[in-house]
Image: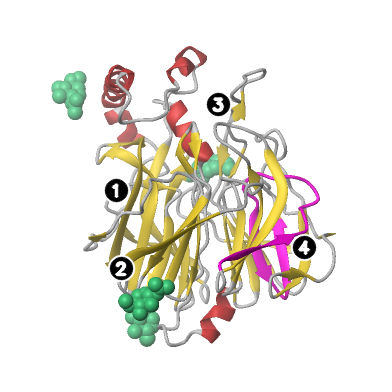
Amino acid sequence: MANKLDHHHHHCPRLMLVLYFTSVLVIGSVAAFLCLCSSKPSLSSVSSFWIPQNPPEIHIQKQRSKQWNDTKDVRLLLSATYADLPATELQWEQMPSAPVPRLDGYSVQIKNLLYVFSGYGSLDYVHSHVDVFNFTDNKWCDRFDTPKEMANSHLGIVTDGRFVYVVSGQFGPQCRGPTSRSFVLDSFTKTWLQFPSLPAPRYAPATQIWRGRLHVMGGSKENRNAIAYDHWSIAIKDGKALDEWQEEVPIPRGGPHRACVVANDKLLVIGGQEGDFMAKPNSPIFKCSRRREIFNGEVYMMDEEMKWKMLPLMPKNNSHIESAWIIVNNSIVIVGGTTDWHPVTKRLVLVGEIFRFQLDTLRWSVIGRLPYRVKTAMAGYWNGYLYFTSGQRDRGPDNPQPGKVIGEMWRTKLKF
Ligand SMILES: *[C@@H]1O[C@H](CO)[C@@H](O)[C@H](O)[C@H]1NC(C)=O
Ligand SMILES: *[C@@H]1O[C@H](CO)[C@@H](O)[C@H](O)[C@H]1NC(C)=O
Ligand SMILES: *[C@@H]1O[C@H](CO)[C@@H](O)[C@H](O)[C@H]1NC(C)=O
Ligand SMILES: *[C@@H]1O[C@H](CO)[C@@H](O)[C@H](O)[C@H]1NC(C)=O
């Protein structure tokens, strides 16, 4: 599809974009938040998550920074996974912020419009609307509701350039359960259409349109943490299903929060993680509690042989990048994300690099740095500019732990 858009819209620089989503993170975020709190059970009570306006945070924060400071030297000695990679400085220009901050929001780009879906406003509040940004005049220009039964985060999402397929995902705040209900947005008429439910509910499955079929892979299973490997597809045209969900070759590594891209007639699944926060047993509000998460930087590719093959690893393990990518000039560009927990501080480490994967040479490189580290950002590309908006940013240049949930939007001129 990325491809397809490319052909259809050459008036925009041959790029295309599609972007997609991310979802990201809730978990991450949550995790982040919560976690900030660390993997030690004793600290888990610090799960206050939301950051800025919360007075008790202050105390916690102090502790955290102290801990971080103590380990600064250690950090330098650790593997590159936890450290920022060398990158060129880019000139960033701040654009109008989104109407609401979002963690685990998802996006698609259709021509000059970026559609930003749902996500968490805070761990206890999820959005159920779409905000639209116009790249031509750089304004947030529209807002409309999502269907009541549609998931609020951890969506599978993809567009064919008009219809936006929204598959399964988490319904409600905290670590509530998933729904298998799926919907289609006709972006031209702003109407929602019914779509066959996924055979089983999933959190943040990789989702793309490839060879006339909507493909949905991996994600987390019903308890939010268990790894799903299933791969289903269904034939689609103009927002409608033409057959029923059928099983395809399962993906060798499952799990949620990956970038999923179609380029040069190949289906690619990039990065992600295994495991995620889960609802505390018997918690009436489905309070999130931390579970083991394993991040990865693997790249899986399926081509006409219909077998999964591995391509070169990302420069870092990276997750929560569902909507954090664009395609331009035969390269995939991915912004930010979240990488392995820091082994000493046990904190989540956010990613501030911009990665490029060249589809002709299959080479990864780091092509720049964001204004800050951020996960579950949503990316777009228009008229030579790379844009990103929203997500959860770090706590400052020296502290890569998750901090504030934002709605900021930034852009930079992109030139390889
Ligand atoms: C880190 O800790 C050292 C002493 O352990 C202190 O001198 C320094 O000011 C601290 N830095 C920050 C940023 O807190
Ligand atoms: C986007 O902005 C351009 C320039 O102001 C305008 O012509 C166009 O109608 C806008 N599109 C939408 C959907 O608002
Ligand atoms: C990345 O994650 C894998 C597990 O998915 C782990 O084995 C590896 O140590 C991590 N770090 C790096 C730098 O690859
Ligand atoms: C993509 O190619 C076009 C045409 O050669 C060029 O103008 C544009 O700057 C390139 N984009 C990037 C991101 O390098």
Where's residue 379, x and y in %? 42, 61
Residue type at mark 4 is Ser
Label 4, residues with CA under 10 Å away: few <14, some 14-19, many ≥20 = many
Could you tell me which quadrant the C terminus lies in? Answer: bottom left
The disc at residue 233 is 4
Residue type at mark 2 is Asn
Q: Earlier in the sequence, mark 2 or mark 3?
A: 2
Image quadrant assignment for residue 86: bottom left
Label 2, residues with CA under 10 Å away: few <14, some 14-19, many ≥20 = few
At x 70%, y 36%, the residue is 226
> Disc 4 to disc 3, how far (Cα)?
32 Å
Residue type at mark 1 is Tyr
Residue where numbered disc 3 is placed? 290
Residue, far top: 42
The disc at residue 138 is 2
Q: Which secondary structure lies at badge 4?
A: strand
Which of label 4 and label 1 is nearer to you? 4
Residue type at mark 3 is Arg
* Residue 204 highlighted magenta (yes or no): yes
Q: Which secondary structure lies at badge 1?
A: loop
At x 33%, y 40%, the residue is 394
Locate residue 126 relative to residue 85 in the image: left or right.
Answer: right
Where's residue 366, x and y in %? 37, 60
The disc at residue 332 is none
Residue behind label 3 places its C-beta within 8 angstroms of ligand 3: no
